[in-house]
Amino acid sequence: MKPRYSIFSLARNALNYHEDWQQVWRSPDPKPEYEVVIVGGGGHGLATAYYLAKEHGITNVAVLEKGWLGGGNTGRNTTIVRSNYLWDESAAIYEHSLKLWEGLSQELNFNVMFSQRGVMNLAHNQHELRELHRRVNAIRLNGIDSEVLDAEQVKAYCPILNTSPTARYPVLGASLQRRGGTARHDAVAWGYARAADARGVDIIQNCEVTGFRISNGRVQGVETTRGAIGAKKVACVTAGHSSVMAALAGFRLPIESHPLQALVSEPVKPILDCVVMSPAVHVYVSQSDKGELVLGAGIDHYNSYAQRGSPIIIENQLNALTELFPIFGRLRMLRQWGGIVDVCPDASPIIGKTPVEGLYFNCGWGTGGFKATPGSGWVFAYTIAQDRPHPLNAPFGLERFVSGYLVDEHGAAGVAH
Amino acid sequence: MLLISCPFCGPRDESEFSYGGEAHIARPSDPDALSDAEWADYLFMRTNPKGWHYERWYHAHGCRRWFNAMRHTVTHEIRATYKMGEPAPALEP
């Protein structure tokens, strides 16, 4: 068992000039065979490993990561956490996730810096405002906190926001989820990795899966850049490469991969203490604890695996930012990057079984997977352990594209993730 | 920013175009005869390759005509653009 992080361990290590901190996780060589191999060492994959060990007692597990932990979309998102989704199916799984977030730092003994600073979604026209009321009512019926603010309340909640009625796109109101907020994305991956490792999970970095060993329609293991590894079950959580992995296993997914770009500004003193999202002028922004503004918007519309996009997308979101916050007009941007998001036709994820026996996929989270990290890992661990979906992820199976029972969060919620 | 060569107008800035997704997906000639799984395959399943991709573009702020392109999804290089109905260029010429 690892020593716990605490104020006392911090003080003790300070006396030793911080030279005696234990390693956070081991880096073992892969064993020839595991009960479960998880492909992808991002937040969702590591959470899956953790909950497999904790909730289901399955510890003979390896997490294979082609690069480094959290080096993909886990480290590329804009860290927003919320559960204000329109449809019951989405509300249930995202709210389950939000509840796990609320105790996560304690549970993992790792500060994921989850900050429930409130997430505000703006409405800029009458139609949006009506939709917003409808959505808030639906969300409240599901027992999730959500409220409507009028323009004056919006101004009081976020004074630097331009709520002038003469603005090009005036703010008419907003929905607010006070329990929403942000978390530190790297810490989520590291916290889950440390906790999973403590329970015996092997975390193997720089190990790319190059193929699946499948016989008689059942998965037997994976081929990797570090040799073949046998497995009774294989779970694939490779956001940004889901279709590529599915092609290796011999089937197709209803997914298109797109770049999603984000950027951060130079750090400034605390100025924005909530998350502001505007689907209409399309930007979402928060301020990190380092003081940088973190902002993002929509995807580049063409398919890509390049982790970069077109400058016009950046220009559009900066236009939106300065429209909403004229005060940010002189702020310089420091870094810009792109991540590859796997988008489903209904903007909802795929979590469940595949045409190959013993092979499970968790993918298609599109632009909004980060907030779901704990819940996604939790239901996916259940699905792998029990070989059937949990009621929370049963609506999100691959079979919904055959039955037509889509969970349409694209059109219905009109959300900018 | 992509420089896209419209087969009708010549090279233009990406901002003039809209994207139309994977090309050469033929609508089934007899939809009634399809099973739900076959219909789902036509409607939703995509190749989404990491590499060369045949895809549709629409010159929205130009001639307002659809055409196809062969573009690489990692380098973003556009190898060819061609009119609707013309055969797709071979992968390796």
Image (cartoon, rainbow, N blue to C red):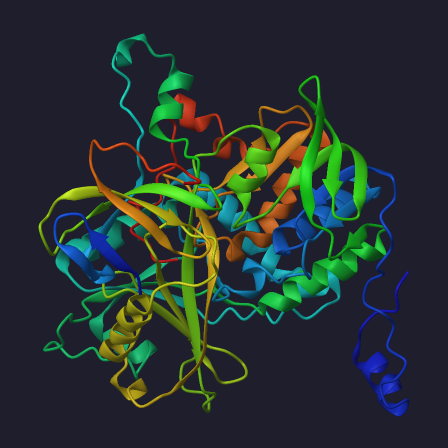
Note whether residue A107 is visible: no
A203 or A387: nearer the viewer: A203
Residue A286 in the image: x percent, y percent? 42, 74
Above or below A37: residue A326: below
Instruction: Determine the residue positioned at 82% across, 63% down.
Output: A25
Split into 4 quadrants, where in the image is the C terminus of chain A? bottom left
Residue A274 in the image: x percent, y percent? 42, 74
Above or below B10: residue A248: above
B90 or A273: nearer the viewer: B90
How many numbered marks, from 0 up? 0
Instruction: Determine the residue positioned at 36% across, 39% down.
Output: A345
Above or below A292: residue A25: above
Residue A53 in the image: x percent, y percent? 79, 45
Dividing the picture into quarters, in which one does residue A262 lie?
A: bottom left
Instruction: Determine the residue positioned at 26% across, 69% down.
Output: A316
Above or below A14: residue B45: above
Q: Would you say B44 lies left or right of A281 here? A: right
Dividing the picture into quarters, in which one does residue A10 lie?
A: bottom right
Note whether residue A384 is visible: yes
Extreme-front residue of the structure: B93
Dividing the picture into quarters, in which one does residue A196 lie?
A: bottom right
A114 or A187: nearer the viewer: A187
A223 or A22: nearer the viewer: A223
Instruction: Determine the residue positioned at 34% across, 12% down.
Output: B34
Residue A139 in the image: x percent, y percent? 38, 49
Split into 4 quadrants, where in the image is the N terminus of chain A? bottom right
Q: Would you say A41 lies left or right of A152 here? A: right
Q: Would you say A175 lies left or right of A123 here? A: right
